[in-house]
């Protein structure tokens, strides 16, 4: 490891990007596995006829393919770009910039499939549904703000210079 604080911060950015990519890949696998597990639980006899479990299974099934494919593609890109950032590869700076900007529409695209299971198992009152949607919208805004805050650091001239 280097004694240069900026180099350490950039390397940490790269390895944390790899970790985030691995989490996205694991989430994609989980999104494909959960509908199958919930279907087995529903037919196991113990939870047969459980309306909440049926709603949960349907909500996961409806968004699983889209959500898993977006998370898998995004996760793979993050792993590759993050590893390149950690090694200060020239193309990785614009690569992480592109992936960062692409994360915003990805977050918006995944908002509905991510919220649907929560709504499926929550109380069906209008107040609780509004609260879940409001909190989810706030978290989405905070995630977008975090990406924009990161890009302020990432696009500083001294950071870009490290990749030339």
Image (cartoon, rainbow, N blue to C red):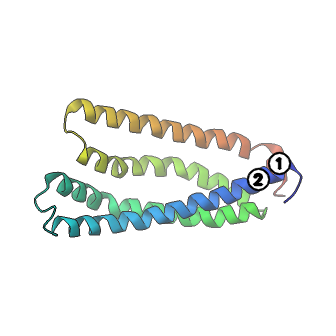
Q: Which mark is residue 32?
A: none
**Can you identify the residue that label 2 sits on?**
10
Gap in angstroms between the C-alphas marked 1 and 2: 6 Å
Q: Disc 1, disc 2: CB below 8 Å?
A: yes
Q: Is residue 110 above or below residue 77?
A: above
Where is the C terminus found, in terms of image quarters? Answer: bottom right
- Residue 53 horizontal/vertical position (percent): 20, 56
Question: Which residue is the extreme one toward the top?
Answer: 127
Image quarter of residue 148: top right
Please report the residue visible at 84 percent of the width from the left and 51 percent of the height from the top.
161
**Can you identify the residue that label 1 sits on?**
6
Horizontally, is 99 left or right of 132 in the view?
Answer: right
Horizontally, is 34 left or right of 105 in the view?
Answer: left
Q: Is residue 80 visible?
A: yes
Q: Is residue 95 visible?
A: no
| The one of 156 and 72 positioned closer to us in this rendering | 72
Horizontally, is 5 left or right of 101 in the view?
Answer: right
Where is the N terminus found, in terms of image quarters? Answer: bottom right
- Residue 90 horizontal/vertical position (percent): 78, 62
Please report the residue visible at 15 percent of the width from the left and 69 percent of the height from the top.
43
């Amino acid at each position: 490891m280097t004694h240069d604080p900026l180099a350490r911060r950039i390397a940490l950015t790269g390895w944390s990007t790899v970790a985030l990519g691995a989490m996205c890949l694991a989430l994609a696998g989980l999104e494909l596995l959960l509908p199958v597990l919930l279907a087995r639980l529903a037919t196991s006899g113990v939870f047969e006829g459980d309306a909440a479990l049926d709603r949960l299974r349907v909500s996961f099934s409806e968004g699983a393919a889209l959500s898993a494919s977006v998370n898998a593609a995004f996760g793979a890109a993050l792993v590759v770009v993050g590893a390149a950032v950690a090694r200060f590869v020239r193309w990785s700076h614009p690569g992480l910039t592109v992936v960062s900007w692409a994360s915003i529409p990805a977050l918006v695209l995944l908002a509905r499939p991510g919220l649907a299971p929560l709504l499926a198992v929550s109380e069906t009152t209008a107040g609780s549904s509004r609260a879940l949607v409001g909190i989810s919208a706030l978290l989405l805004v905070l995630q977008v703000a975090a990406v924009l805050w990161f890009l302020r650091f990432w696009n500083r001239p001294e950071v870009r210079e490290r990749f030339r």
